[in-house]
Image: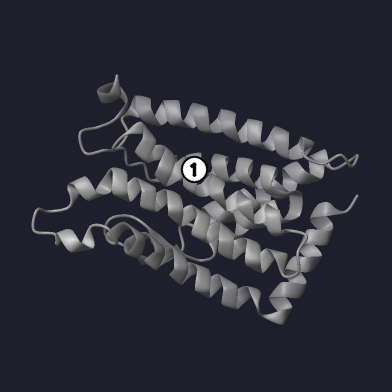
Amino acid sequence: MTQFLVTADGGLTTAGYALCIVVGLILIVVAAYFAGKSSDRPGMGTRQLVFCAMAMALAFVTSYIRLFTLPWGGSITLCSMLFIVLTANWYGPRTGILVGLAYGILQFIQEPFVLSFFQVCCDYILAFAALGVAGFFAHRKNGLLWGYIVAVLARGVFHCLGGYLYWMDYMPESFPTALRSVYPIVYNYSYLLAEGVITVIILMIPAVSRGLGRVKQMATEE
């Protein structure tokens, strides 16, 4: 069954792509549905669907704008994580997690690499869904900023978990044993924190902060 869906080099076969696209579409529809239901205020459903769809589209587009790409996966993009974090900041952690989960499926379809089912969950599904934890900070002072920082750290946890459980088995025998315990952390947080620092600097620009505040007002107004 695995050979039917996954190629020998870890990519997807035509059947694998077809299955992932179907599953991805289903998850996107489910995420959009629950995003629209996550607020008790009347008239919010359609607005939430539109803003979540726009944020996911912007995240997907900016994920292609890469400032730097690492050889074993991972890249510094033009603030792509921020757009998923915004949905959590606007509508809460449940919506942010669902949107992140759907976005993770899109990322997997965009550039799939399969070592095992759980590795796919760590690197794509759970990692991007973790960006939704930013919603827990939405009502605090500087909630978007702190939520973004925590979300980036949370995403890194799942990438590191996948690194320890799967990716380290592919390191050459000459790789220093002393570095095995820290390599997944250093590798994954190197690009995540680099993009995070760039995004935080942008968020601290007064004009950007005011602009995002107005967008949030439009996204959440009745």
Residue drawn at point x = 80 percent, y = 66 percent: 214
**Image position of 50 with respect to 63: above or below:** above
Q: Position of residue 181 (x, y in %)?
A: 27, 58
Q: Is residue 74 left or right of residue 41?
A: left
* Vertical order, 86 against 8 (above or below): below
Lateral position of residue 43 relative to residue 72, left or right: right
The residue positioned farthest toward the bottom in the image shown: 206
Q: Residues within 10 Å of mark 1 (few under 14, many from 20)?
A: many
Name the residue that disc number 1 marks: 126
To which quarter of the image does residue 149 belong?
bottom right
In which quadrant of the rendered image does the N terminus lie? top left
Location of residue 154 in the rendering, given as x and y in whole percent from the top left corner = 51, 55
Q: Residue at point 43% right, 49% down?
A: 158
Q: Is residue 42 left or right of residue 16?
A: right
Q: Please, is residue 181 above or below residue 129 in the view?
A: below
Res. 38 image quadrant: top right
Q: Amino acid at mark 1?
A: Leu
Quadrant position of residue 49 = top right
Question: What percent of the width, then of the height, locates residue 36?
Answer: 76, 38
